[in-house]
């Protein structure tokens, strides 16, 4: 059960990572002309259309992560503590904190993208998107490292 | 006051307030509840092991505080958000939109600071 949930959590995280990265690049470096390169095409996406998907994927990834965390706390973390992997556990703790803060930002993020106001600075929306992108990337990388701790030989 | 304007004020206030209140809950260890997953028990409030004779046996009943910290901050932030939703538009216009990302960014830095003790722990045998 835990393994199945972890795999689904990972798949949702990959989808979220892709959507978030598309949107962030399109927000900071929108392509004005017809793109010729791969990078140009990558960032030529209608940013606002990603907002709904990102909110749903983020919430789903957080929910699945919250469930998997129960197994992690009982079966994995005590072993890591006994082995003295304190920095890795610290980085994972930061993932928990960042994800919680990001989850609370989702309503404001959604409003900024789906119901933007003319007098609202575009920088607010871009900064909010960047913070969420940082959280998503951090969570993905730290989760991946911890999941494969022994494979990395740490 | 339209519902979309009220929801905007709620969302902005909720996101900002949650970031601050989460750091407070983390610093003061204010978990709304503590979960013991191996025992299938949920206790109201923050509970730490008081077993002074064998603290190393804590792994037998590990406690989860993260859900509780998040619930504490979420509950309080909802209250702040609801108050903001009913405030007159002319009051909330004074709110600088930049706080929406500055406050969470600062809260994340505060979380890094509060997590620093983990990185100072020595591995076993040292």
Image: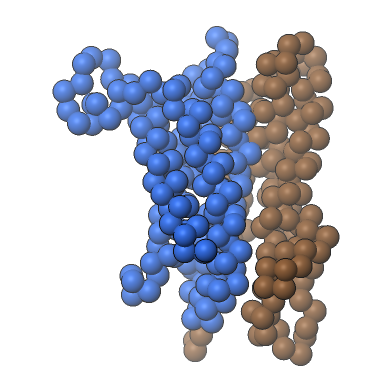
Chain colours: A blue, B brown
Q: Is residue A124 left or right of residue B82?
A: left
Residue B96 in the image: above or below residue A56: above
Viewer-closest of A122 and B50: B50
Q: Position of residue A140 (x, y in %)?
A: 43, 52
Residue at 70%, 84% in the rendered image: B55
Residue B64 in the image: above or below residue A79: above
Residue B21 in the image: above or below residue A33: below
Residue at 60%, 41% in the rendered image: A103
Q: Is residue B89 left or right of residue A81?
A: right
Q: Can you say which quadrant of the picture contains the N terminus of chain B?
A: top right
| Residue found at the far left of this picture | A36
Q: Quadrant of residue A65?
A: bottom right
Q: Is residue A48 left or right of residue A39?
A: right
Q: How many marks?
A: 0
Q: Position of residue A107 (x, y in %)?
A: 62, 30
Q: Is residue B18 left or right of residue B100?
A: right
Q: Quadrant of residue B49?
A: bottom right
Residue at 55%, 67% in the rendered image: A72
Report if residue B46 is visible in the image.
no
Residue at 48%, 34% in the rendered image: A54
Q: Position of residue B111 (x, y in %)?
A: 60, 53
Q: Quadrant of residue A35?
A: top left
């Amino acid at each position: 059960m835990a393994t199945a949930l972890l795999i689904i959590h990972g798949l949702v995280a990959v989808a979220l990572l892709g959507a978030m990265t598309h949107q962030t690049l399109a927000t900071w470096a929108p392509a004005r002309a017809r793109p010729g390169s791969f990078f140009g095409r990558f960032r030529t996406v209608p940013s606002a259309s990603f907002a709904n998907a990102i909110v749903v994927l983020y919430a789903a990834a957080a929910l699945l992560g919250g469930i998997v965390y129960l197994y992690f706390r009982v079966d994995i973390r005590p072993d890591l503590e006994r082995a003295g992997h304190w920095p890795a556990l610290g980085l994972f703790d930061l993932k928990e904190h960042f994800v919680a803060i990001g989850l609370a930002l989702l309503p404001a993020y959604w409003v900024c993208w789906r119901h933007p106001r003319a007098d609202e600075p575009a920088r607010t929306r871009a900064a909010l998107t960047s913070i969420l992108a940082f959280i998503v990337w951090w969570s993905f990388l730290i989760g991946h490292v911890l999941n494969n701790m022994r494979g990395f030989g740490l | 006051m339209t519902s979309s304007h009220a929801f905007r004020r709620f969302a902005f206030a909720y996101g900002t307030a949650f970031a601050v209140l989460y750091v407070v809950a983390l610093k003061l260890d204010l978990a709304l509840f503590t979960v013991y997953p191996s025992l299938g028990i949920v206790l109201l409030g923050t509970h730490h092991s008081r077993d002074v004779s064998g603290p190393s046996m804590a792994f037998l009943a590990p406690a989860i505080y993260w859900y509780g910290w998040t619930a504490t901050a979420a509950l309080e932030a909802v209250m702040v958000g609801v108050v903001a939703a009913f405030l007159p538009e002319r009051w909330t216009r004074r709110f600088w939109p930049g706080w929406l990302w500055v406050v969470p960014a600062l809260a994340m830095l505060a979380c890094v600071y509060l997590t620093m003790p983990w990185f100072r722990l020595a591995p076993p045998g040292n």
